Amino acid sequence: MAVLTGTLTINAAFLAEIKEDNLRLRELLNTAAHDATDSASGRINARERVELYQALRDQLALHFTLEDAYGYFHDAIEDNPWLTAAAEKLHLQHDLLFREICNIVDASECILYREYNAIHVRDLLSNFMEFFARLAEHEHSENELILAAFDDDIGVGD
């Protein structure tokens, strides 16, 4: 019985362009991070925070969709095992990061509507900053992968 295995690699040019063009995502992330680090209870009210997190979630969904559609290649003709492993690891993080921002949106809505299971605002802000750090590390790793792919394409990689 034959088993088909797929490979995943990146389209460095498109992935780099997607990252450069996503100004709105960076603005939303910076606003939310500024809110979360401003004080123990943030600097904006609960409704504004929910709207900010919802916009961030939607923008992140668009960002990941574009990266998935144009920034990654499935079943590439040329296979670089290191690049494939790194691309697969980073690609899998999209779903985890998206679910994490969805949980943050849900938690902020619970606070807004004063639901019985609402967490404290300071815990929400802390959760956001942990997410923010993981997303920043993910984006940094994708940028490193882009550079490695460019190096590989021009023959200066490992």
Image (cartoon, rainbow, N blue to C red):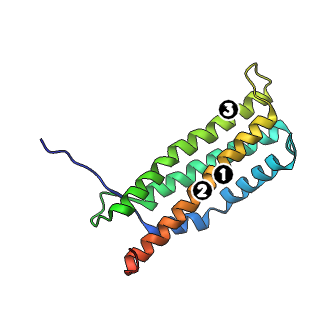
> Crowding near pointer 3: few (<14 within 10 Å), some, many (20+)?
some
Q: Which residue is mark 3?
A: 106
Does residue 150 appear to the left or right of 127 in the view shown?
A: left
Q: Which residue is mark 1?
A: 133
Callout 3 secondary element: helix
Percent x, y for residue 15? 49, 64
Res 138 seen here: yes
Q: Is residue 49 above or below residue 82?
A: above
Residue at image point 75% right, 25% down: 118
Which one is closest to the eye, mark 1 or mark 3? 1
Q: Is residue 130 above or below residue 72?
A: above
Res 13 seen here: no
Residue at image point 74% right, 45% down: 52
How far apart marks 3 and 2 lie (CA) works out to 23 Å
Q: Earlier in the sequence, mark 3 or mark 2?
A: 3
Residue 137 is tagged as 2
Q: Residue furthest left?
A: 1
Does residue 133 appear to the left or right of 30 in the view shown?
A: left
Residue type, numbered disc 1: Ala
Q: Earlier in the sequence, mark 1 or mark 3?
A: 3
> Crowding near pointer 1: few (<14 within 10 Å), some, many (20+)?
few
> Crowding near pointer 2: few (<14 within 10 Å), some, many (20+)?
few
